[in-house]
Structure formats: structure tokens, C-alpha cells
Image: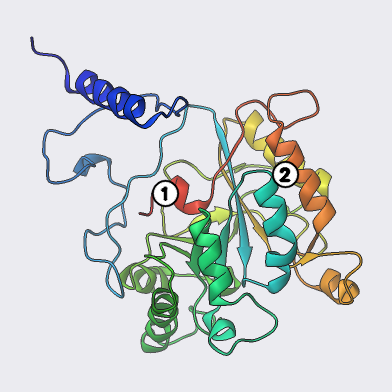
Amino acid sequence: MNRPRSVWAAVTICVILAATGITRVFVPTSLSVPASTSSSVPASSRPAHTSPTTTGAGQAKPHRPERYKPGQTVVSLTFDDAYENQWLYSVPLLRSHHMTATYYVITINENEARQCCMSYDQLDALQAEGNDIGGHTITHPNLTTSTRAQARHDVCGGRQDLITNGITDPGSFAYPFGAYDAAAEGVVRQCGYTTARVGGGVSRSNTIPGPPYAETIPPGNPYALTTIAPNGSQPIQLPVMKAFVSAAAANGGGWLVITFHDVCHAKAADFTHCMSEYGSVVDTVFGRFLDWLQSAGQPGGAPSGVLVRNVCQVMNCH
């Protein structure tokens, strides 16, 4: 009997799940198997800007973003610069909520063991727990004003630093200062990253949601993921974060990538300085936001169907 390929794929998945004891799984809205066995992704469905090559300091390998139900809202929590206070205050909260995030690393800080930032051991531990560890260059230059040679040194070198120090196949990147152009995109792709986040692009305001309310899945350009930095340079407020998520959910869903920097603790000696930094958030505020996200679809929680996934989970970097 000739069954459609999608039926055989579904049967195979069910057999694997039964054998491994997995009883709960997200099933995509459609399931198909390409005719060719040379790739798991039909060429016609691959996003633009991807090139099939090797990993390491070479061009990015092909990828297929995860599929989600129409209208679903996916939230990605992204942290710039890999500050030590992110380890101290965001990580325990994420662990307790069974969530993961994306951390973008300026590797000179780890290379020189600067006290401001996480160590490679901490970053390795985060990746082992399912977090996404991405690149943010070696020294955080503005890539739009760097020469191509300088950009390649900083972008490729930063990725190689991560690999050398235990991070497996880093796929995510964030442009320093959020600044990018076609030349910067090309360098990031050639250095082996799967995707890159820019600065802004979601809404015209950092406090009042407006169109565009979210990035699309898959994104229009995986090397120019749009984001929102709630409250801009001011400390991030819980009602503002909730408003952006709720607005995305009410306007067709999509992918809301949120940018954070310092995570501040009221009893820490550097609390005042921490709160003066760009895009800081108090740990208790961040915790209440995670509570709200975790309660999606329940009274007092985020809108029904809201999910939290890190960038590489959405983009299927690996």
C-alpha cells in the first residue's frame, strides 16, 4: 500500500517517541519529507541568505527555522555582553522557570578573565543546560565603520574564541551597537554564524507597542533579526515588557526578540551603578516577567499560546 511520505514520517516519529518514553511533543502544523535524501530541508523552503558549508570559521551551514502554529507568539530573551550579574541573577530565575535564553559574548572579557563578565566555564555550563551562547565579537567594534579585514578579525576571531573554549558550534550573533549593513552581514555569514540580531526594528517606540509588532517566523532576513529593547536606555519596566508581548499576540503573533543588558540586585553593592547602565532590569522585575510568561493562557498570565524559546531553538542553528 502506497502511503504518503508524511504518514510514514509521522509513524516513524511515534515509534521513536514510544521507544524513548517521551509522552509529550510539539507537533508542527504540517509534516513532510523531501524527495531528496541529500538534505532534510527542501531547497525551496530554505530562507534566503544561507549557504551550505562547513562549521568553524567558514560560511554558515543551512538551517530550517522551527515551525509554529499560525498566530503563535514566541518570545526570545537575549542578553548582551555576558555580564557576571546575568549569571548571578538571571540564570537562577530561568532555571527555576525551566526556560533558556541567548547570551551574546564579547570574548576579550573572557580571554582576559575580567571580573565584569562570565567565565568560559560558566558559559560552557549554560550551553550544557540548553542555553544559546552566541558571539558579540572580540572587542565590540562598530562593524559598519570597520574595514573588512578588521570586521573579519573581530567576528571570526570571536567565534573561534568560543569554539576553542568549549562552546559547540555557536550559531547566534548580535551586532555591536545593533549597527549593521550588507558588508557586516556578509562577514557574519562567512564567519559561520547562522543568524544575527540587529538593534531595534520592532515598533517605533521602546515604551508603546506599534507596528511592526514582532519578527516573522521564519525571519525575512536571518542576518537582520529585529528586536525590542523595552524602555530603551532606562531601566526596564514590567508593564512595558508585558505590553509588547500582548501586542504581538493580539496582532498575528510572530517572534518577539527582547534585548537585556545588566541584571541588577537591590542588595548588591553596585546596584546604583548597575541601574544606571543601558537596558538594565531589576532581578525581581525579571522574575515576575518570567512568572507571567510561564502562566500563558491562565488568569493573570500572558496570552494563550505564548512560548519562550532561545534564538537558536527558533532558528534550529544546530
Residue at left offset 46%, top offset 46%: 314
Mark 1–mark 2 Cα distance, whole angstroms, equals 22 Å
Q: Earlier in the sequence, mark 1 or mark 2?
A: 2
Which residue is label 2 attached to? 290
Which of discs 1 and 2 lies nearer the camera? The answer is 2
**Dot 2 amino acid type:** Leu
Residue 11 falls in image quadrant: top left
Residue 291 falls in image quadrant: top right
Residue 49 falls in image quadrant: bottom left
- Residue 84 x/y as whole percent: 69, 73
State the residue in front, 32 or 240.
32
Does residue 235 appear in this view? Answer: yes
Which residue is label 1 attached to? 315
Characterize the local packing of mark 1: few (<14), some (14-19) or many (20 or more) Cα atoms within 10 angstroms. many
143 on left or right of 185? right
State the residue in front, 297 or 150.
297
Characterize the local packing of mark 2: few (<14), some (14-19) or many (20 or more) Cα atoms within 10 angstroms. many
- Residue 271 x/y as whole percent: 88, 71
Q: Count all numbered tags in the image, as a single digit.
A: 2
Residue at left offset 53%, top offset 50%: 310
SS label for mark 1: helix
SS label for mark 2: helix
Q: Residue furthest top?
A: 1
251 on left or right of 8? right
Residue at left offset 54%, top offset 86%: 108
Does residue 208 appear in this view? Answer: no
Q: Which mark is residue 167?
A: none
**How are the residues colored?**
rainbow
24 on left or right of 262? left
**Dot 1 amino acid type:** Met
- Residue 90 x/y as whole percent: 71, 58
Q: Is residue 82 above or below residue 258?
A: below
